[in-house]
Image (spheres, grey):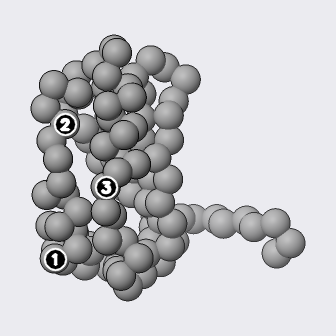
Amino acid sequence: MFIAMNNFKVVAGREADFENQWKNRESYLQEVPGFVEFALLKGDAAGEYVSHSVWQSRAAFDAWTKSESFVKGHRQGSLSGVLETHPFVKLFESVIVEKKGG
């Protein structure tokens, strides 16, 4: 399992704009081989958000970043004026995975 987390800091008062942009987007992820799950997470700190995607492997994630689905998904809308700083990505390879019932 491979996890990609894109970290965002949203300008105070623009949280609804940020969330709506994500809610109203077309992700194109369902057509991508190796995609498992996506979640947009809101942190406890003001303006803190993380896009969290789970992939079968790093190779699947890397292939997505070079795909037309990636280009189409990232071509939508602008976050100009909504973010305090540039987002930053953190990538993780699973070492241990536990699931309920398994």
Q: Is 33 rendered above or below residue 13? A: below
The residue labelled by disc 3 is 25
Question: Mark 1 is on which residue type?
Answer: Glu
Q: Is residue 39 left or right of residue 83?
A: right
Question: Mark 3 is on which residue type?
Answer: Arg
The residue labelled by disc 2 is 79
C-alpha span from label 3 to label 1:
16 Å
Q: Name the mark on residue 68.
A: 1
Q: What is the quadrant of the C terminus in the image?
A: bottom right
Label 3: which secondary element: loop
Question: Mark 2 is on which residue type?
Answer: Leu
Q: Is 73 rendered above or below residue 58? A: above
Near mark 1 (Cα within 10 A), the count class, few <14, some 14-19 or many ≥20, is few
Q: Is residue 21 left or right of residue 45?
A: left
Q: Is residue 55 visible?
A: yes
Q: Earlier in the sequence, mark 3 or mark 2?
A: 3
Pointer 3 with pointer 2, Cβ within 8 A: no
Q: Is residue 90 visible?
A: no
